[in-house]
Structure formats: C-alpha cells, structure tokens
Amino acid sequence: MTHDSAAWDERYSQEEQLFSGRPNGALVAEVAEMAPGRALDVGCGEGGDTAWLVKQGWRVTALDVSRVALDRAMRRAGDATTNVEWVHAGLVDAALAQGAFDLVSAQYPALLRTPTNDAERTLIGAVAPGGTLLVVHHADIDVEAAKAHGFDPADYVMPTDVAALLDDGWEIEVDERRVRDVPAGGGSGHTHDVVLRARRSASKHEARCSPSPTA
C-alpha cells in the first residue's frame, strides 16, 4: 500500500474518482445523532465524509497526504468549504493541537505502525475531553492477496491497536465487526468492517492513553 504523498497523488490521478463519493456507512451510523462540534477527518480523500459532516453542522479539519485528493475534496465542498480547514499532511506530521476535536474520525486509514505507536497516540491525543474517537477498518483481510499487491496488513494500524492504548480515562462504546455495503468505488470488494468508537472522559486529568513502553 502507498503511504507517501507522491504515491497517493499517483493513485488518485489514475482515476477521475477513486471512491464512491458517499459518506462512509459507519461514520453515518455512529455520528448522525451526535451534537456537532469540531471534527478531524483523518485521510479525508475526495471529501465524502467531510461534506457529510459539514452538512450535519460540524466544523471540520480535513487531513490528507494527497494534494490531488484534497483538491477534489475542496471542489466537492463548494461553498461549504468555509467550514473546513484543509491540511495537506500525514497524521503524525500535521502538528495537530492536543485535545482539540470533539470527533476524530479515521475511516480505513493507511497509518504505519511504529514501535512507539505514533499514529495511535496522535489519534488519541487529538480528542477533546468528552469527545469521541471513531476508527474503522476492513475486517477479514486476505493477507496473502494483500501481500501480492505490496501491502502487508501487519504494517498498518488497525482499530485493535488503538483500543489497546485506551485506559480507564476512556469508555469503549462500540468494538465490533459488522457488515458493510459499498456497491462501487475503492474498497467495494470488502464485505465487513471493524468499528471502534470510544468516548474520552470529560476530565482532562482522567483522559490519557497508556504510557509509552520503556526501552
């Protein structure tokens, strides 16, 4: 799987539209009833989730490593782009403010695993006290088929990796495998998702992730 800016730009450039354009089903199911606030859309792609969040009243920081994807997302947002901050960067490199977002949404993110869990800790650290972390990925990945396409799932962060770093300052509200229905676009061949939704304690002092392992 590609994970640098140039490689993702090339992938997006090969198609006029890479993904379905619809908001991800898990996002809609988990967020539709939430009071809107400030959201971080991690790996926003062509902007389907960002556009939906804005329509629900959220102020969105839309983050993606691909300039091509961000340009498409901005065009999609149209006049609503005034409610979006566009960030051209990878998650770990984006220098996001700690505890700034009422919702951090990472839908099928291509986040590399590291010995110090940098991506997971960045996701967790971005959530405001009382806020929600939503991480969704494909379930039942065919590892051998993925490796044949240059993608080793073991190299990338999954919802279970994030859940493992949540301590008693968090309440895990959803942690399950569920059916997904995406008839077209990238990822349409996957039939099930793993969905993690967790809420951070309203107290800054109680909400924290587990400490980094010592050498």
Image (cartoon, helix red, strand yellow):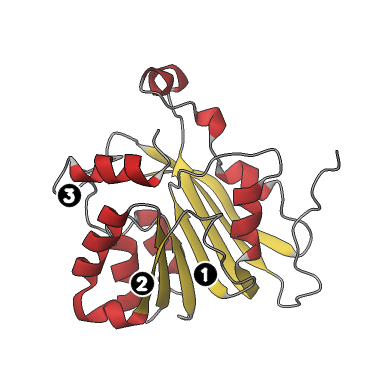
Give SS at disc 2: helix
Task: Find residue 25 and report its image quarter.
Answer: bottom left
Residue drawn at 65 percent across, 63 percent down: 125
Q: Position of residue 86 (x, y in %)?
A: 37, 69
Q: Nearer the viewer, mark 3 or mark 2?
A: 3
Task: Name the residue nearer the viewer: 211 or 187.
Answer: 211
**Classed neighbour count for the residue bearing mark 2: other residues with Cα under 10 Å, few (<14), some (14–19), many (≥20):** many
Q: Residue 6 is drawn in which quadrant?
A: top left
Find the distance from the CA under tag 1 to the CA under tag 3.
26 Å
Q: Amino acid at mark 1?
A: Leu
> According to the image, label 2 marks what residue?
53
- Which disc, if any, is residue 17? 3
Q: Position of residue 204 (x, y in %)?
A: 75, 75
Vertical relation: 60 (above or below) 154: below
Identify which residue, 192 or 97, lies in the foreground: 97
Q: Is residue 97 visible?
A: yes
Which residue was labeled with disc 1? 103
Q: Are marks 2 and 1 in contact (CB under 8 Å)?
A: yes
Residue at point 52% right, 69% down?
103
- In the image, 51 versus 45, the foreground residue is 45
**Percent of width and height locating residue 141:** 44, 29
The foreground one among 122 and 49 is 122
Residue 184 seen from this side? no
Q: Is residue 167 above or below residue 140?
A: below
